[in-house]
Amino acid sequence: MAELSLTLSERHTADFEMIGNGGFAPLTGFQGSADWERVCSEMRTADGEYWPIPITLATDLDCAVGDVVELSSDEGKKLGRITVEEIWERDVKREAEQVYGTTDEAHPGVAAIYEEGNRMIAGPIEVDALPDHDEAFMRRYKTPAEHKADFEARGWKKIVAFQTRNPIHRAHEYLTKAALETCDGLFIHPLIGKTKAGDIPAEVRMRCYEVLMENYYPEDRVVLGVKPAKMHYAGPREAVLHAIVRRNYGATHFIVGRDHAGAGDYYGTYDAQKIFDEIDIEELGIEPLMFEHTFWCNECEGLASNKTCPHDQEARLFLSGTKVREMLGNGERPPHEFSRDEVADILIDAYKED
Ligand SMILES: [Zn+2]
C-alpha cells in the first residue's frame, strides 16, 4: 500500500507545532467529533478540561480509520504523522456561531474555517520535527517545558505573561511593569509566524523587544520567548486559549487588555475580559490580569489608564497606528512619551531599508 501523506495548511502546521511542543496541552492530537461538540457548546474537551476553540484537521484525503498519514508543513518539511481514529463532518455554521459569535463570512476567523471544508480527520499525532522559523525567532525558541524549567531555576513563583504581535511602545511597557510590580517575573511572549508583505520583519521585531529589555527592564526579571501559533481571531475565546497556552509555558498570570484578540467590530471592548467571569480560574490554572487602555498623560506627567487618570482627552497623548507609521517612514521619532528612542530608531532604520 502506498504511503499516505498530507501537506498541512499554514494554520494546521501551526496547530501541529503547538500540539507537538506541549503548548496546547492537554491536547495530544487533532480533535474528533466528541471534543468538537463539547468545545463548541461548553468550552471543554470531551474529558471535561477547559478548551475554547476546536483544533481540528480538515482534509479531503482518501483514507480510513486506522490509517497512518505522514504530515508535512506548508513549506514541505516532514513533521511526523497522525493515526486516524475518526473521520467526521463538522457543522461549520454552528462552530462559527458558538466559537466566533458570528456566521459572517467577512470575519477573518470564520472565513478561514469556511474555506477549509468540513470533512475532518482526527487522532493522536507523533512528532519527529517542528516547523522552521526565521533565525531571529529561533534564537529565542524554547518549548513550554524548557521555559517552565527556566522559571523554576530563577526561583520565580508568580510569572505574568504578556502576549503581543507588535513592537512594544511605552503604553504597553507600562502595563507589563504595572503587572510585574506584584509578580516575580515577566514573560514577554510575542506571537510569531511567517512574515508576510507589510509585516514588520522578524529580525526587526525581535530587536525592538531586545533593545527594550536591555535598556528598560531589569535583566533578572524578564524573559523573552516566542509563541509559534497563528491567530484564530476568535475574540473572547481566543483570549482563553492564549491564557491556557501561557499556563502551559509556566506562567501563573496573563495580561488581558481591552479588545484582546479582537477582529473588526465583532466583539465588545471588554468581552475578552468578561469571558473569564464564566470560568473557574483555579481550575483553569492561570489568572487573567485585566488592564484598561494605557497612555501618556501630560497632567499626570506619566503613563496612566482610564482607571488611574482623571483628566480629559486633551491631556492625553494619542497617536494612531497610521500616524506612527507615517512618522517612522519619514525618519521621525514619535514623541519620547510614546516610544523609547531605541525602539523608534530600529523601526526608522527598518523603514529606510524597505
Ligand atoms: Zn492624567
Image: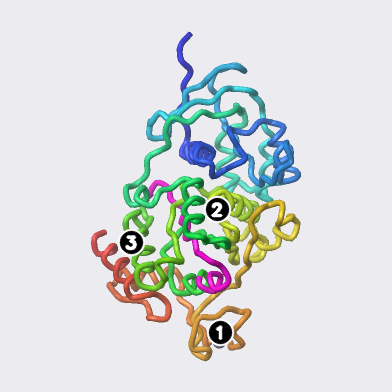
Q: Amino acid at mark 3?
A: Arg
Q: Viewer-nearest of labels 2 and 3?
A: 2
Q: Viewer-nearest of labels 2 and 1?
A: 2
Give percent across and percent down for residue 285: 66, 53
Which residue does the numbered mark 3 point to in the structure image?
207
Which residue does the numbered mark 1 point to in the structure image?
313
Residue occupying image coordinates x 46% and y 21%: 5
Q: Callout 2: few (<14), some (14-19), or many (20+) C-alpha neighbours within 10 Å?
A: many
- Which sits earlier in the primary sequence, circle 3 or circle 1? 3
Q: Quick one: SS at disc 3?
A: helix
Which residue is the extreme one toward the bottom?
Answer: 299
Which residue does the numbered mark 2 point to in the structure image?
250
Q: Quick one: SS at disc 2?
A: loop
Q: Callout 3: few (<14), some (14-19), or many (20+) C-alpha neighbours within 10 Å?
A: some
Q: Is residue 194 above or below residue 31?
A: below
Magenta residues span 177-196
Q: Amino acid at mark 1?
A: Gln
Closer to us: 199 or 293: 293
Residue 160 occupies which quadrant of the picture?
Answer: bottom right
CB of mark 2 near ligand 1 (< 8 Å) = no
Give percent across and percent down for residue 105: 60, 46
| Picture quadrant of ligand 1 | bottom right
Closer to us: 314 or 241: 241
Residue 350 occupies which quadrant of the picture?
Answer: bottom left
Looking at the picture, the colour scheme in use is rainbow
Mark 2 and mark 1: Cα distance apart in space: 39 Å
| Magenta-colored stretch includes residue 87 | no
Q: Viewer-nearest of labels 3 and 1?
A: 3
Give percent across and percent down for residue 137: 37, 50
Disc marking residue 112: none
